[in-house]
Image (cartoon, rainbow, N blue to C red):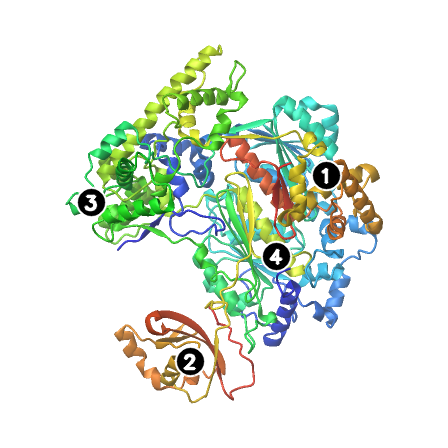
Amino acid sequence: MVLSNSPITFWAGYAKFKSNIRPSSRVSPPPSGPLPSVPIAVGCRSLVFELQHTVQLRSSVPPMADASAQQSSRSRDLDKLLLRPGHLVGPAFEPGTELRDDLQEYARILVVGAGGLGCELLKDLALSGFRNLEVIDMDRIEVSNLNRQFLFRLEDVGKPKAEVAAKRVMERVSGVNIVPHFCRIEEKELEFYSEFSIIVLGLDSIEARSYINAVACGFLEYDNNDNPREETMKPMVDGGTEGFKGHARVILPGTTPCFECTIWLFPPQVKFPLCTLAETPRTAAHCIEYAHLIKWDEAHIGKTFDPDNPEHMQWVYSEAAKRAELFGIPGVTYTLTQGVVKNIIPAIASTNAIISAACALETLKIASGCSKTLSNYLTYNGVEGLHTKVTEFVRDKDCLVCGPGIFIELDTSVTLKMFIDQLEDHPKLLMSGASVSYRGKNLYLKAPPVLEEMTRSNLSIPLLNLMDKSPNGIVHVTGTAGKGDKRQSCSRKLRVSFKGVGGITDTDMAGGA
Amino acid sequence: MIVVVCVVTFSTPSTFGCRSKLLYSLFFRKNLTACTNILLQRSRSLTMAEPKTKYDRQLRIWGEQGQSALEKASICLLNCGPTGSETLKNLVLGGIGSITVVDGSKVEIGDLGNNFMVSESSLGQPKAKCVCAFLQELNDAVKAKFIEEHPVTLIETNPSFFSQFTVVIATQLVEDSMVKLDRICRDANVMLIFARSYGLTGFVRISVKEHSVVESKPDHFLDDLRLNNPWPELKKFTESIDLDTKDRVAHKHTPYILILVKMANEWAKSHNGKLPTTREEKKEFKDLIKAKSVEPDEDNYKEAIEASFKVFAPQGISSNLKRILDDSCAEVDSSSSDFWVMVAALKEFIANEGGGEAPLEGSIPDMTSSTELYINLQKLYQAKAEADFLVVEQRVKDILKKIGRDPFSIPKSVIKSFCKNARKLTVCRYKPVEEEFNSPILPEMQKYLTDEEYSLAVGFYILLRAVDRFSANYNTFPGQFDGAMDEDISRLKTTAVSLLTDLGCNGSTLTEDLINEMCRYGAAELHAVAAYVGGVASQEVIKLITRQFVPMIGTFIFNGIDHKSQLLSL
């Protein structure tokens, strides 16, 4: 096993963290569905013994003493994995009915996305011993979802995906509670995300993955030796598919690479230059994008193109067809027009099933330790034969999102100006002309001049004041670093701590977010 | 400035499912030939609006033809535990023609914990009936029926039952039944696929005598541009272009095909007719291209340098294609399939008119160019492809006549598609499972047994077979009940050792840890594992039915411990 940290300790540690910081932190109840609000500890096995009420909870579960009872239990198959000891398991695996019951009672899993992967994930997790699930998705059901999103029916078209998906799984798997959230992921407070033991991602965009990754990594704290505090780690499991191909990965912030560490996996985006569209179109797609991006605005002043409006799509299609005919370019069809304009990724049920199953299995392993965990990136390709590959990517130590950042200790009197000057001499930074931001707010911007002028007045204010008197926190700086010819612009994450303020360790919740 | 993004190719490992703008490269290629007819589209959209929209995301992968093949297919599922149910679910969603679910068991409480297709209200009812009802709910276009019968009984007593199906999906069968069913399906020419989930492992194995694929649609395939072997018309067209034109606009809009054909020709003239082969020569060739560029940012010259490897690529056909041409099936007679008749014609074409090359594919990738030059080039390639097709078509007719068949029995469109994909033809053959069970390829087996990357997968392979022997002897799977764990472990170990000996792998051993692990599984069918294994099986079934893409060859062993799953060719 490559991972030095046991999966189960992330989880148990997480609960310690929870009980220390915010015993009952939900700001407002979720929009619908009964929430199993566990009063104190969430997912802490060690705490189970200390809490009177949990003993009562457990006694409500039928005893599994003899073999015949086991064979006739709902968890007949899963019990083999969770109740029996093994040698090829996670380091902190403690098999037994307690483990199974704790997974049911205390593990809380968030599924992000209720689409092709999300539907499968909810089903897989509900049948993998988890009972407390939540799902968040901003989309409504469309007809073109029905070839793979098996929880939806024709009569559901137009309804929120998260709500229908949650309802359907609860109808079929008794004992499972799924709370749906029909909203954008950005609409939720950070605290919402901090509630979960593990976050599972079934998304189709880079931006959404980046966002959740930043939120989850933002919970991560480092000690003064730059070692991640296990109890603050929020594991993520991420899946993605396209046609016959897909990937599944496990992200343990601070231990395995986060989404941002390996952002280079996304190939650089090739662009159609404007001149190609306007002057030298060669392919059907060029004609379609001309109609979509240039002709539409010319012909419809002030009316925004709506890809979901069939009349708009038809207009783009016929304009593209005209242009194609003019240039003698073959291949413009209505289907292609939709594909190009809406940027449709082909998707099928089988691939989603495979990738979701891998993600659900990894989630179960992280939560229970019942087997080793994927380390750390699985690709599946069924185009030509069948190829699966596991790659062990490494972390980017300087990652702005999951890295520890550079530790800097300051006197409370240090102004922003003094702080920026210090960066020039700091041996690890040597950064000049720095711009500074804290929690997404720009404290000082070197350029452009307008913004420089607007933020200039901050320079004379003590940094401590600019950081809302917080004794420590994460500050991002961007400037020019390096020596001589090798000078280049760069961004750095700094872990700032003020001498002699407060007694609490650095707990910046918004670190990477 | 408008930035629109296009054409992204993935290399492994990569990250999928990202709606980074326009990931539709795959899709372009396949739609170039689609015709545009508004009226046709409109009338269709009135009657078929729903299926067309419903299946849109998959039609973009396998097209109308693939979809119609699925809609004509009839599937038989044996055993509808989670592995079987999940396999069928993925096919029903995609609009498979009909399904027949065969299972003789009743729903027990344990089934509720691993099978989504049964629920509390199903307890005590026939499992086949409940699963069938749920599947029907997913897609009313599918004809769904069930038979309450144990698959083993059907195999033993009613072998002719299976001949009515396109594909039989056999899940959770033990070795003995697999062997018998395999014989039945081979005799009846029915495609067969086995799938099994067992604890954190499982397997998928296709069993079909022969499966030929014309539209194999590989991800990365060198396009057929003939840069180093231009036919006369392309040569002539290239000669009409002046790379040293003083017209700046024309200079930077000369497509790289023309640049490279011209440069390759010039190089050959000054090198005794040879093209660059050594590293130095290749570099020199690229430098010559660079020197032709008059401005630093001429995209067409940058593209020419990047594509120069296409000039260095060997001429003629690949070893894969050669193997197909040399196959004994290419000696056709009246019983030959259309595929092999076309292969025979292809072989003649390559030896004669083709001059060692397959028929031209006829499409070119997008490249920086003026519209006019690009369209003209496109037409030139298409014309050559059409000419090659006509020759092959004539040869197909002649061969059909010679073997006493109707010369027009193979449709034009089929021959056309065959020509277009001639370089990508694939033939998959699967040996009978009995042969693999009794005499696997020993050197392969030994290689796997000693290769670190394969250690878990091959261990699982042996143990998956050992548990069947175990159950044949002791009427239970190892670890199925809690009481006898220690005894089962030592029995399984003995069984595995004797199996290895029978296979001729004397001296090979499996780790105690893995044997323990297999006993821990106690034949559990975990939902997530079943969903994975069933997902793989359904993906392969789609490839088999649509006859597009290449199905897996060998036995796929799922490794749920670290996901280092493997395909074993035994």
**Circles 2 and 3 on the same subunit:** no
Disc number lying in front (1 or 2)? 2
Residue at (62% x, 61% y) in the render: A2
Residue at (80% x, 49% y) in the render: B489
Disc number lying in front (3 or 1)? 3
Disc number lying in front (1 or 4)? 4
- Name of the residue lying farthest toward the left: B246
Please report whichever mark, 4 or 2, sits nearer to the chain's N-terminal start.
Answer: 4
At label 1, which amino acid type do we have? Answer: Gln
At label 2, which amino acid type do we have? Answer: His
Which label belongs to residue B125? 1
- Name of the residue lying farthest toward the front: B272
At label 3, which amino acid type do we have? Answer: His
Disc 3 secondary structure class: helix
Vertical arrangement, residue B144 with respect to residue A270, above or below: above
Residues packed near mark 3 inside 10 Å, few (<14), some (14 to 19) or many (20 plus): many
Which label belongs to residue B251? 3
Q: Which residue is label 4 attached to?
A: A363
Disc 4 secondary structure class: helix
Mark 1 to mark 4 CA distance (whole Å): 32 Å
Locate the N terminus of chain A by quadrant.
bottom right
At label 4, which amino acid type do we have? Answer: Thr
Residue A175 visible to the viewer: yes
Comparing A236 with B96, the one in front is A236
